[in-house]
Image (cartoon, rainbow, N blue to C red):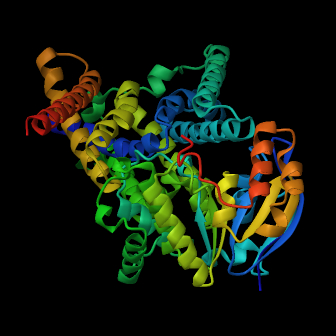
Amino acid sequence: MNDFWIILEGSLVAVSCGLLGAYLILRKMAMVGDAISHAVLPGIVIAYLVAQSRSSILLLLGAALFGLLSTFLIEILAKKARIQSDASIGITFTWLFAIGVILVSLYSGNADIDQDCVLYGDIAFVPLDTLFLGERDLGPTPIWLQGFNLFLVIAMIRIGYRGFLITSFDPSFSSGLGIKTDTWHYVLMGAVSFTVVLSFNAVGAILVVAFLVVPPATAYLLSNQLQTMMIYTVIFGVLSALIGFYLATWWSASISGAMAVASGILFLGVLVYQKLLRKRKKFLAITN
Amino acid sequence: MIAFEAHNLTVSYDKQPVLWDIDFEIPEGKLVGIIGPNGSGKTTLIKAAMGILEADSGFVKIFEKSPDEIRERMGYVPQRQSVDWDFPATVMDITMMGRYRKGKLFGRLSKADREIAVDSLKRVGMYDFRDRQISELSGGQQQRVFIARSLAQQADIYLMDEPFVGIDAASEESILNILREMRSAGKTVIMVHHDLHTALEFFDWVVLLNTRLVAAGSKDEVLTEENLRTAYGGKLNVLSRIADLVKRQEYPLREEDSKE
C-alpha cells in the first residue's frame, strides 16, 4: 500500500506541476518554479516568527505569499526596469533567498527552523502522515492536499483555457481585445506559487522543478496543439513517477531523485526518437 | 464620418517621447499608410490607438468614441515577429482567436464563430492549411493567418503593423487584394508601412510621421518632396531615391519583397 501512495503522490505532483509548467514553457519562464522555490524562504521564516509555531498551514501560506511576491518583482523588474526576464528572475530569487538566509541566521538561536526541515519534504515519508476522521483512516494527508490542488488546477485551466491560450500566444492582440493580460498572468503565477510550495512540502525541491519543466518540455516536442501538449504532459508525468519509483527500489536510491531522472530519460528518449524519425523520413524522400 | 482621429497625442517610451503632439483625422473607407523613418513612432501610434500603450496626453477616437467603448469594431494585426511561431497551435486555433471576446472568454464558441473563422481562412487562401501547426508555415503564410484572424474579428476599422514585411510575392498579392476588397466593403484599414516605393501604389491616404506629425491627407497632398525631406531628414540615400520618385511620379519596381 505504501508503494501505491508514493506513486500516486508522485503522479499528482507531476500532473499539477506539469500542466502549469506547460504554460510557463510557452511563456518562456520555465525557471520561475526554481525561483519560487528559493524566494519563499523569507516568507516561511516571517510566518514562523509571527505565529511562533511550526504549524504547516501558516508556513505554507507565508511561503505562497512570498512566491507570489517574487512573481510580482520579476514582472516589475522586467517591465519597468526593462531588464531581460531571465535576468530579472535571477535578481529576484537570489535576493529574496539571501534575505531568508539572513533571517534564519539571525533567529536560529531561539528557533528550530531551517529550510530543510520546513520546506523540503521527502516523498518516501508521504504514507506516514495519515489523515484520520475520528477513528477512520482516510489515507495520507499529502494525497488529499495534492488531490484537491490538482482539482483546482484542472478547473482553472478548463474554465480559463482560452484566456490562458491567447494571453500566452499573443499578449498584444489580447490587450487589443480588451483582455486584462496582467490579471491572467498573476492568476497563473498564483497557482504556480501555491502548487510549488505545496508540492515542495511533500516531495522535495528537485522533483518539483523537474516536474514543472521536463514532462511539458517532452510533450512540447510531440505536440502541434496545446490540448495535445497537455495530454502528453499528463502521460509523461505519470510515467516518470511510475518508472522513477521502480528505479529507486531497484537501485535503493532516493525516490524523488529517481523520478526526476526518469523524466529526463523520457525526454532524451523522445528527442532521439524524433531525430531518427526525421532522418528516416528524409532518407525515404531521397530514395523515392 | 471620421473613422480615426488623434488629438494632441503624446506617447513616450522610457521617458523619451516617441510621438509628440500628434493631431490628425482619417475619413471612413480609406486605405491608409502610416509612413516614416525607423523610430518615428509608427508602431507606437497603432499601439496607443489599440489601448496597448498609454498616452501621456491627448487621446485617440475611433468613430468618435474612445477605443475602449468600441473594441468590438476594431481589428488588429500585430507585428508578425512579436509572437512565437513555434507555439503548439494550428492555423485554425489562431484564426479562432479573432472570435474571442472580452466578455465571452469563458463561454463556448458557437458554430457561427467557427464558420466565420473558416470563411476568413478561405479569403486569405489558407483554408487548406487549417490543421497545420503554425511553425510549418512560411513567413507570408503566417502573415496571411494573422490577416485571417483579424478578418474573423469582423471589424469596421483595422489597424495593422507592417503586414508586408518579409513575405513572398504571392502572399503580398493576396493580402493586397483582400485590403482592396475591404475598402470596397467600406472598411477603414490603417497600416504601418516601411517601404516608400510601394506606398504610392498601395494607399489612398497617408500619415507621414517623424515623432511629430509631418503631414496627413490624401497621398498626392502628402507625398511631396518637401514633406518627405522633412520626415526623412539627412538620410541622403533615401533622399535621392525620393527625389527620383517624385520626379518620375510613377511607380518604380520594388527592390526586394523581403527585408529579412
Residue at x 55% of width, y 46% of height: B256
Pick the residue in front: A251 or B137. Answer: B137
Say above or below: A70 vs B29.
above
Q: Which quarter of the rendered picture does the C terminus of chain A lie within?
A: top left
Q: Name the outermost residue toward the left.
A: A288
User: Is B186 situated above or below A63?
Assistant: below
Residue A175, by quadrant, is bottom right
Query: Number of marks in the image?
Result: 0
Task: Judge by depth and name the residue closer to the eye, B109 or A134.
Answer: B109
Image coordinates for residue B38, horizontal then vertical, percent: 74, 44
The quadrant the N terminus of chain A occupies is top left
Q: Name the residue rendered at 61%, 18% in the picture.
A: A101
Query: In terms of depth relative to the viewer, which is nearer, A18 or B4?
Result: B4
User: Does residue B51 show up?
Assistant: no
Q: Which residue appears at 48% of the width and 44% of the height?
A: A192
Q: Position of residue A158 (x, y in %)?
A: 38, 62
Q: Residue B244: percent from the left, percent from the top?
A: 76, 49
Question: Does residue A109 lie above or below B165 as drawn?
Answer: above
Residue at the image position 27 percent from the left and 53 percent from the top = A228
Drawn side of residue B172 relative to residue B121, left or right:
right
Q: Quadrant of residue B179?
A: bottom right
Above or below, B170 relative to B28: above
Residue A87 seen in render: yes
Position of residue A142 measured from the top left corner of the image (x, y, whole percent): 33, 41
